[in-house]
Amino acid sequence: MEKIKTHKDLRVYQLSFEAGMNVYELSKKFPKEETYSLTDQIRRSSRSVSGNLAEAWRKRRYEKAFVAKLSDSEGEAAETQVWLDYALACNYINEEEHAAIFAKYNSIIGMIVTMIINPDKWTL
């Protein structure tokens, strides 16, 4: 395994960025009346996952700050899952699309929780 130099080297960051882009592509087909509600909310929360991971990485000198930003990231991932549930319930996405992206966010949450439980492996 190569040394992690930046947040972009973290597998969880890469996966969260990819998931955020998946959400963006899915949300393009949401109706116009959702522009300032569901579309905006799901895009913001999905992008916040990777954004908070980047912040956590830069704060890893301080374990509590690192864990706090990871917790924010975990929360944003869970929030994204809620918006995905709404998108499915409103028939903006189908079951297959929902299942695939929801599973990706479950993996992301699992990776983040592992980092939260073992911060000493990541902090300076």
Image (cartoon, rainbow, N blue to C red):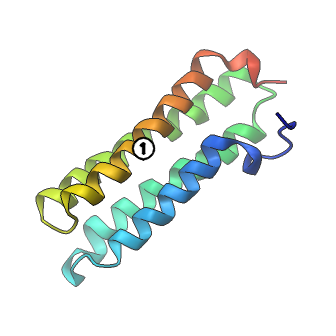
Q: Quadrant of the C terminus?
A: top right
Q: Nearer the viewer, residue 2 or 119?
A: 2
Give the number of callouts. Answer: 1
Residue under the point 50% across and 39% down: 108
Q: Quadrant of the N terminus?
A: top right
Q: Is residue 123 left or right of residue 94?
A: right
Q: Quadrant of residue 91?
A: bottom left
Q: Is residue 79 left or right of residue 67?
A: left
Q: Is residue 63 left or right of residue 40?
A: right
- The amino acid at mark 1 is Tyr
Give the residue furthest to the bottom. 32
Report x, y in % for residue 72. 51, 38
| Up-down relation of residue 62 to residue 40 (above or below) | above
Q: Residues within 10 Å of mark 1 (few under 14, many from 20)?
A: many
Residue under the point 27% across and 65% down: 38
Q: Please, what secondary structure does the residue beneath circle 1 have?
A: helix
Q: Nearer the viewer, residue 10 or 59?
A: 10
Instruction: Please name the residue that numbered disc 1 is placed on.
Output: 105
Residue under the point 78% across and 24% down: 123
Q: Nearer the viewer, residue 87 or 36?
A: 87
Residue under the point 27% across and 54% down: 98
Q: Is residue 91 left or right of residue 112?
A: left
Q: Quadrant of residue 69?
A: top right
| Up-down relation of residue 50 to residue 22 (above or below) | above
Q: Nearer the viewer, residue 117 or 105?
A: 105
Report x, y in % for residue 80. 36, 50
Report x, y in % for residue 90. 12, 64
